Amino acid sequence: MKKAAMATLLLLLLSALTYSYAEETFDLRQHLCTVTRYDVVKDIPGNVLMPSTIPDQCTPIHLNLVVILCYMFKLAMPARHGTRAPTKKKIKELNDLATRMEVLLQDTKEQKLPLQKVPAWFWEWKSPWKGKLTGGELVREGEEEQYNLGIRTRDKFPQLFNEDYHPDVYVIKATQIPRASASAVAFGMGLFSGTGNLGPGRDRAFAVTSESRASDIVLRFHDCCQNYKVFRKNQEPAVHKLKEPILDEITNALRRRYELNFTRQDTSSLWYLCKQEASLLNVTDQACDLFTPSEISSLEWTDDLELFTLKGYGNALNYQMGVPLLEDVVQSMEQAIKAKEEGLAPGTYEKARMRFAHGETLLPFSCLLGLFLEGSDFERIQKEQPLELPPKPPQRRNWRGSEVAPFAGNNMLVLYSCPDNSSSKYFVQVLHNERPVPMPGCDNSDVCPYEVFKERIVAPHLKHNYNSLCNLKSEEPEQMSLTSKLSEMLRSQRSNDPQSTKLLQLVHLQSDPKVPAVGLLTTSAH
């Protein structure tokens, strides 16, 4: 009995020590959902995967930054804008919170309640953005994030960025939202720093192009998709209903802790203030200090729940509407392969396509690639079956907004060209926030033979046509389907390539209305 009692005591002590250690090491800056700063999460241990070995003598040939990478010759990259200021709507919410706090303090005085529990900062607090008439712009920290990302990208892929600059070789695109284009400029300044003749830093001019906001279905597909707008508007009340029990529980805890008559809306606004203070001002001892670590984890989960439902795997339309971006990425890789096969001279073909957009762009693209799924979920999204909501803390979950789409979050797809004696002539590597990330469609490897990447990850999505998905009433002439476009791209490849022939047959089957369709997908600005 004594031994049993001693064992129980030791377990209790160990549990207490573990809890204490968790409390001390809890970094709330890693739990701010999509308001999380890039440098806080890009290197956290949970993101680290033992990268696959690129076959010897393989060289990168193209990069996609949304972002793309075996013998590298081209890079494709979608990225989210960097850290930004609160929007006008949120500035108003914070101003309203300041007024509300004055009312709470006045009520406490009138009711002669004890004031010693009231946080000291409450008495003099004013919104740091009070009087600001505009919002949403890229802040200094956001500029630095993108500038440094540009430098690291060039250092990581020197074979790709060894050409003289030309806008057709290094394509940079952004949405017409100012913080996205400003992010593209900051990134380009880092990427091309020291390669020009302007000023003491030898900067150079470079082009950033944009499509009209009204018709940009590649980078702002969410803003052009009418059916998605209807879905989101209809679904938001249900999402808020799901969050209410957590908010009510924490609101009651705050009332007991500080003896102030907080409402659910107060809790929501204080949580938003916490995220803004921690991310933009590096202040963690005011609004954030109101909550315990477990409460912050629960509030983070409610944000992740909303993100999952309205922008992620919660509804197939959320990511299916991103197929134009996925097609653009595949097309850029096809062109790079064609240039390699034809032996075009350096400087005459595109080596990197870099795109700067928003969380609503990056999230669907990550979903199209099948990233951040649990267990067998990849097979379920291929069949367009609904997924379970992200598990509540303290359970572990892959879907966390702070990792999926922090400020300046990015996906890189790198295309490699390999020797003829390799298992595949071309490989694709996927990096998320500059780290290798497993692809369920490629046996959870971060490196995938290009033909396998197209067949397993890309092709199932190509049955979806943006117009038919998004138009409430399709009154315009039907455009060429995505499957037809991919068929044309594949025909351009060598006719003796059995993998291309196999994929071409698959695409034709998917375009045949008599054949059951299979499932497909495509990087973070609020």
Image (cartoon, rainbow, N blue to C red):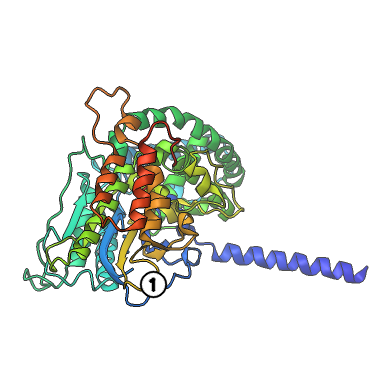
Dot 1 crowding, Cα within 10 Å, few <14, some 14–19, many 20+: some
Query: Circle 1 sits on which residue?
Result: 54
Left-right relation of 526 to 30? left
Disc 1 element? loop
Position of the N terminus, as image quadrant, is bottom right
Q: Is residue 168 left or right of residue 8?
A: left
Looking at the picture, does residue 177 appear above or below residue 52? above
Q: Amino acid at mark 1?
A: Ile
* Residue at the bottom extreme of this rendering: 56
Horizontal and vertical percent position of residue 104: 49, 37
Depth order, front residue of 246/236: 236
**Rendering coords of residue 234 (x, y %):** 43, 27
In this view of the protein, which residue sits in the foreground, 30 or 377? 377
> Where is residue 413, by image quadrant?
bottom left
Number of numbered discs overlaid on the protein picture: 1
For the C terminus, give its image quadrant. Answer: top left
Q: Is residue 153 above or below residue 96?
A: below
Q: Which one is in front, 27 or 414?
A: 414
- Which residue occupies the foreground of this view, 420 or 28? 420
Q: Is residue 219 visible?
A: no
Q: Residue at x 43, y 45 (%)?
A: 272
Q: Please, which residue is most extreme toward the right here?
A: 1
